[in-house]
Image (cartoon, rainbow, N blue to C red):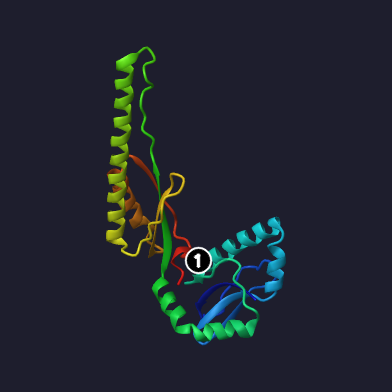
C-alpha cells in the first residue's frame, strides 16, 4: 500500500486530502501512524510509472498531499513511490522502527524546511574598445581578466560569509554542491518564524551585494528525512 508520510497518532480525527485514485487512510500502531492510500498497491504503482503523464500526475499529487498534511500537523514525509506489500508489512515496519520515527517526529515538531537560494550576479563590464590594437588591446584584455578574477574571489568570500552566518544560527544546515549557478542552503526552522528570517535575509543581502538571495516559505522537511 502506498504511503505518503508518518505522523504521531492523532488524538482527534485528521482531515485528509483526496488520494490519487481513492481515499487516504491513517494506519496506526501505538503512537505512530502512517498516511496511506490503500487502493494504490505496488502493482498499480508499477503500472503508473510506465506512463510518463500518469507518473507526473502522481508525483504532483504526492506534493499536494504532503503539503496539505504539513499545514495541519508534524509529518515525516516518505520518498515518492514508497509502497509496502500490504497492511501487515506496514504495521510491522511501524512497530519495528517506532522509537526511531517518533524521535525524528519530535525533532521536527513545529518546524519546517527553509531553502535559501543564492544566484551570483554577473560582473558588468564595458565592452572592449575595438579601436585599441597591439599592446594596448592585450593590456585591456589582461585587465578585464584580472577584474573578473577579483570579482569571483569577492563573490566566494561573500558566499563563505553567508554560510557562516547561516550555520551560526542553524548548525545542522545542509550546504549541497552548487549546480547551474544555483547555490542553496537548507535548514530546519520554526514554521511560524518567517518574519524573523526576513530580518536575517536583509542583513545577509547587505553582506552579499554580489548575490541575489531568495528565501522560501517553510516546506515539508524533504531534505531532513531520517
> For this view, does 139 lie left or right of residue 63?
left
Residue 69's spot in the image, x, y percent?
Answer: 54, 68
Residue drawn at x 50%, y 67% is 70
- Residue 209 appearing in the image: no
Nearer to the camera, 226 or 11 = 226
- Measured along the vertical axis of the image, is residue 132 above or below residue 1? above
Q: What residue lies at 29% left-to-right and 44% top-to-bottom?
A: 206
Report which quarter residue 15 is drawn in: bottom right
Q: Point out residue 62 in the picture as x, y percentages from the top left corner.
A: 60, 64
Q: Quadrant of the C terminus?
A: bottom left
Q: Nearer the viewer, residue 138 or 35?
A: 138
- The 10 Å Cα crowd at callout 1, few under 14, some 14 to 19, many 20 or more, is some
Residue assigned mark 1: 71
Pinpoint residue 147: horizontal percent, then vertical percent.
30, 31
Residue placed farthest to the top in the image? 131
Query: Which one is nearer the viewer's eye here, 194 or 77?
Result: 77
Q: Secondary structure at mark 1?
A: helix
Residue 164 drawn above or below residue 29: above
Q: Residue at x 70, y 74 (%)?
A: 39
Above-or-below relation of 213 to 88: above
Q: State which quadrant residue 81 falls in.
A: bottom right
* Image position of 88 (left or right of 130): right
Amino acid at each position: 500500500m502506498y504511503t505518503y508520510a508518518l505522523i504521531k497518532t492523532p488524538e482527534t480525527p485528521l482531515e485528509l486530502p483526496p488520494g490519487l485514485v481513492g481515499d487516504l487512510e491513517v494506519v496506526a500502531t501505538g503512537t505512530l501512524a502512517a498516511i496511506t492510500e490503500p487502493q494504490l498497491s505496488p502493482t498499480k504503482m508499477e503500472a503508473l510509472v510506465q506512463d510518463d503523464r500518469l507518473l507526473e500526475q502522481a508525483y504532483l499529487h504526492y506534493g499536494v498531499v504532503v503539503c496539505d498534511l504539513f499545514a495541519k500537523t508534524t509529518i515525516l514525509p516518505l520518498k515518492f513511490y514508497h509502497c509496502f506489500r500490504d497492511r501487515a508489512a506496514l504495521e510491522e515496519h511501524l512497530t519495528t522502527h517506532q522509537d526511531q520515527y517518533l524521535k525524528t517526529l519530535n525533532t521536527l515538531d513545529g518546524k519546517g524546511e527553509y531553502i535559501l537560494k543564492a544566484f551570483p550576479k554577473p560582473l558588468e563590464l564595458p565592452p572592449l574598445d575595438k579601436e585599441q590594437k597591439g599592446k594596448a588591446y592585450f593590456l585591456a584584455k589582461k585587465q578585464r581578466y584580472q577584474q573578473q578574477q577579483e570579482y569571483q574571489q569577492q563573490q566566494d568570500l561573500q558566499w563563505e560569509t553567508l554560510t557562516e552566518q547561516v550555520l551560526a544560527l542553524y548548525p545542522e544546515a545542509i550546504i549541497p554542491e552548487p549546480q547551474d549557478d544555483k547555490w542553496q542552503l537548507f535548514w530546519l526552522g520554526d514554521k511560524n518564524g518567517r518574519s524573523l528570517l526576513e530580518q536575517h535575509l536583509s542583513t545577509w543581502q547587505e553582506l552579499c551585494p554580489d548575490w541575489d538571495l531568495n528565501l522560501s516559505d517553510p516546506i515539508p522537511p524533504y531534505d531532513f528525512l531520517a
